[in-house]
Image (spheres, rainbow, N blue to C red):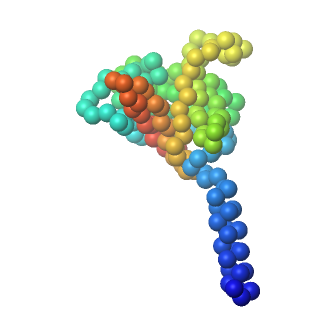
């Protein structure tokens, strides 16, 4: 093997190694990337056929979340507002966070309606959704649900407002 072939092979191995070790923007998104105003533009169920009656986030019918607006400030105390006239509309207060677990980004929130900020630590239950893609002006969350003995997924697509 001559020096030029060796140099090319070495460069290829280095590039391959660096790309294998890099993290894609779709896999891990920093918390600051979620800050802002968002709208759910699509809600769908993957892994199940037919019409299902699903109450999302112990709040409203899944379809009520299409068109809902989400305010995610940097301090974590945000809200989502259901805007569909056929649904229980209005703002819901939330405490949101983002974390990385095993290379996957998780979007977490708990409802804070009627709870003072200083008492937020007392709310133990909430929701954790996997971020399956993240681009500058959109992201997708996926929530697993056990249905008839198998896991199906509720998928929420967000767009920056």
Q: Is residue 30 left or right of residue 55?
A: right
Report which quarter residue 33 is drawn in: top right
Query: Could you tell me which quadrant the N terminus lies in?
Result: bottom right
Q: Is residue 73 left or right of residue 139?
A: right
Q: Nearer the viewer, residue 15 or 43?
A: 15
Considering every residue shown, the one lying at the far right of the view is 3
Q: Is residue 55 above or below residue 71?
A: above
Q: Is residue 13 above or below residue 5?
A: above
Query: Residue at coordinates 59% horizontally, 47% vertically from top-left?
Result: 27
Considering every residue shown, the one lying at the far left of the view is 50
Residue 40's spot in the image, x, y percent?
45, 37
Can residue 81 be seen from the camera position used here?
yes
Residue 17's spot in the image, x, y percent?
68, 63
Q: Nearer the viewer, residue 145 or 131?
A: 145
Q: Is residue 5 above or below residue 57?
A: below
Query: Residue at coordinates 64% horizontally, 31% vertically from top-left?
Result: 97
Q: Nearer the viewer, residue 116 or 46?
A: 46
Residue 43's spot in the image, x, y percent?
39, 36
Residue 120's spot in the image, x, y percent?
67, 16
Can residue 84 be seen from the camera position used here?
no
Query: Residue at coordinates 52% horizontally, 46% vertically from top-left?
Result: 133
Report which quarter residue 83 is drawn in: top left
């Amino acid at each position: 093997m001559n020096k030029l072939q060796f140099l090319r092979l070495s460069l290829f191995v280095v590039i391959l190694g660096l790309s294998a070790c890099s993290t894609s923007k779709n896999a891990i998104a920093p918390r600051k990337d979620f800050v802002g105003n968002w709208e759910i533009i699509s809600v769908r169920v993957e892994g199940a056929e037919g019409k299902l009656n699903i109450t999302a986030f112990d709040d409203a019918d899944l379809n009520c979340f299409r068109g809902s607006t989400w305010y995610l400030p940097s301090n974590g105390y945000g809200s989502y507002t259901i805007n569909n006239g056929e649904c229980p509309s209005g703002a819901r207060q939330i405490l949101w966070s983002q974390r990385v677990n095993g290379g996957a980004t998780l979007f977490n929130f708990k409802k804070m309606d009627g709870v003072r900020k200083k008492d937020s630590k007392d709310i133990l239950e909430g929701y954790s959704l996997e971020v399956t893609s993240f681009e500058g002006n959109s992201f997708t969350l996926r929530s697993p649900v056990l249905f008839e003995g198998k896991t199906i997924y509720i998928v929420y697509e967000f767009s920056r407002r």
